[in-house]
Amino acid sequence: MTLAEKFAYMATGKPYNDLDPLLVQARDQATLKANALNAEDDSGRKKKLVRQLFGSAGQAPFVNPNFRCEFGQNIHVGDNFYANYDCTILDGAPVTIGDDVLFGPKVGLYTSNHLFDARERQLGGCVAKPIKVGNHCWLGANVSVTPGVTIGDNTIIGAGSVVTHDIPANVIAAGSPAKVIRPITDQDKTGFDPHNPKYR
């Protein structure tokens, strides 16, 4: 089985062997690439390293150190993706992130779970489910997203939240587990315009 075939199998949600040498090698390679990304100061080279690590990336991706991921190849981000410090993405299954998404410090997206039976867990049994984050979302500091979750467009997840189920578009959600607090409406607009000299 090739690595691509292994990833395709893992994306089905069926149990897989997390100790498979193919996965161990891919994980080690991702760590080396992430180390290089975290050590790079030049913005142009950082973008190139992001594209080498991720499965795909839109325009102007930016990732602060210390970024960590499991494989990298299963991460797909849109335009203007921004991850603040200490972001972790465990991409045993695909992680799809839309355009103009902001991650606060220490955000974690975790597609994989160990199996519940102690013996199966000891043997390396895991399952993975995809995570999707829509366009124009903001995940506050220390947000954790668990396997199989979809977050809709424009939604804000409050700091420290644990997202265990789907969150719809255009809302503010927070808590553990995260729950919808209220919709985002026109009343949330402040009139901010960076071209207006009164906003400095």
Image (cartoon, rainbow, N blue to C red):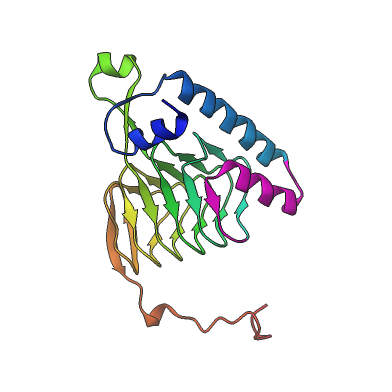
Residue projecting furthest to the right: 42
Q: Residue 45 magenta-drawn?
A: yes
Residue 29 locus on image (x, y percent): 59, 29
Residue 117 locus on image (x, y percent): 23, 20
Q: Quadrant of the C terminus?
A: bottom right
Judging depth in this view, the residue of 70 and 103 nearest the camera is 70
Q: Quadrant of the N terminus?
A: top left
What residue is rendered at 57% in x and 51% in y? 84
Residue 199 locus on image (x, y percent): 64, 80
Q: Compared with residue 65, is residue 97 higher up or lower down, i.e. above or below?
A: below
What residue is rendered at 37% in x and 39% in y? 111
Q: Compared with residue 105, is residue 195 higher up or lower down, i.e. above or below?
A: below
Residue projecting furthest to the front: 1
Which residues are drawn in magenta?
A: 40-59
The quadrant where residue 158 appears: bottom left
What residue is rendered at 28% in x and 36% in y? 13
Judging depth in this view, the residue of 189 and 127 nearest the camera is 127
What residue is rendered at 30% in x and 19% in y? 121
Q: Could one spot residue 112 in this view of the protein?
A: no
The quadrant where residue 130 appears: top left
Total numbered labels: 0
Judging depth in this view, the residue of 42 and 65 nearest the camera is 42
Q: Could one spot residue 82 in this view of the protein?
A: yes
Q: Residue 186 magenta-drawn?
A: no
Q: Compared with residue 104, is residue 33 higher up or lower down, i.e. above or below?
A: above
Residue 69 locus on image (x, y percent): 52, 37
